[in-house]
Image (cartoon, grey):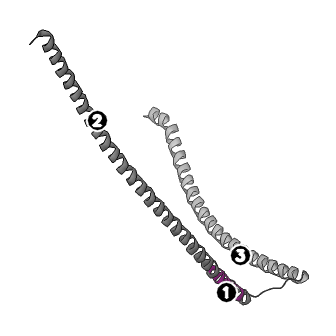
């Protein structure tokens, strides 16, 4: 048994050391988590202060820029206009734009009417020329039909003349055969 105690003694010592180290580690983790929370709170505080400082800086920069522009405008004989005056000028410009738009619309309307009349005149001219061509075409078709009828009549007469000539030749041949044979 003594040997068993001697053999397990180093293992027992290692287990006790590990338990002590785990306990120390648990305390370190808790301590780390507390410090992490404190750091997060500190970060949030500094972030808010940084935003405030940034806003203050932007406001001061804007004020300085406005003052610089005003000084430059006065030094170079430019006039500075208030927001209300600027609004009045914008309204006048808008009114002028509307008047110009009306004038452009009138010009466009006049041009559109002129173009529409020209288009109507050309369309009427096209329809007249088309009607004339159609009439010429109809006359040509009638002439072709008339010529085809005359051609058909001529063919018919030629066929009849050939048939008559053939009958005459046959009749003359029969007569000549009858004369030769003595019948």
Is residue 120 inside the magenta stretch? Answer: no
Mark closer to the observer (1, 2): 2
- Residue 55 tag number: 3
Q: Secondary structure at mark 3?
A: helix
Choose between 134 and 31: the one closer to the eye: 134
Chief secondary structure of the magenta portion: helix
Tell me residue 79's x, y (percent).
Answer: 83, 85
Q: Which residue is mark 1?
A: 91
**Residue shown at 15% from the left, 18% from the top:** 175
Q: Residue furthest top?
A: 181
Which residues lie in the magenta part? 87-101
Q: Residues within 10 Å of mark 3 (few under 14, many from 20)?
A: few
| Residue 94, position as x, y percentages in the image | 66, 83
Q: Earlier in the sequence, mark 1 or mark 2?
A: 1
Residue at image mark 2: 155
In the image, 141: left or right of 162? right
Q: Quick check: 68 above or below 163?
A: below
């Amino acid at each position: 048994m003594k040997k068993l105690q001697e053999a397990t003694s180093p293992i027992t010592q290692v287990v006790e050391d590990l338990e002590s180290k785990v306990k120390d580690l648990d305390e370190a983790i808790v301590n780390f988590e507390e410090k992490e929370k404190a750091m997060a709170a500190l970060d949030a505080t500094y972030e808010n202060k940084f935003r405030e400082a940034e806003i203050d800086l932007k406001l001061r920069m804007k004020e300085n820029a406005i003052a610089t522009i005003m000084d430059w405008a006065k030094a170079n004989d430019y006039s500075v206009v208030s927001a209300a005056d600027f609004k009045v000028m914008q309204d006048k410009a808008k009114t002028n734009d509307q008047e110009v738009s009306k004038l452009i619309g009138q010009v466009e309307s006049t041009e559109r009417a002129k173009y529409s009349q020209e288009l109507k005149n050309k369309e009427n001219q096209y329809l007249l020329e088309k009607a004339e061509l159609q009439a010429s075409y109809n006359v040509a078709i009638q002439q072709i039909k008339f010529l085809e009828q005359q051609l058909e009549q001529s063919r018919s007469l030629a066929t009849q003349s050939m048939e008559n000539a053939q009958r005459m030749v046959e009749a003359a041949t029969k007569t000549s055969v009858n004369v030769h044979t003595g019948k």
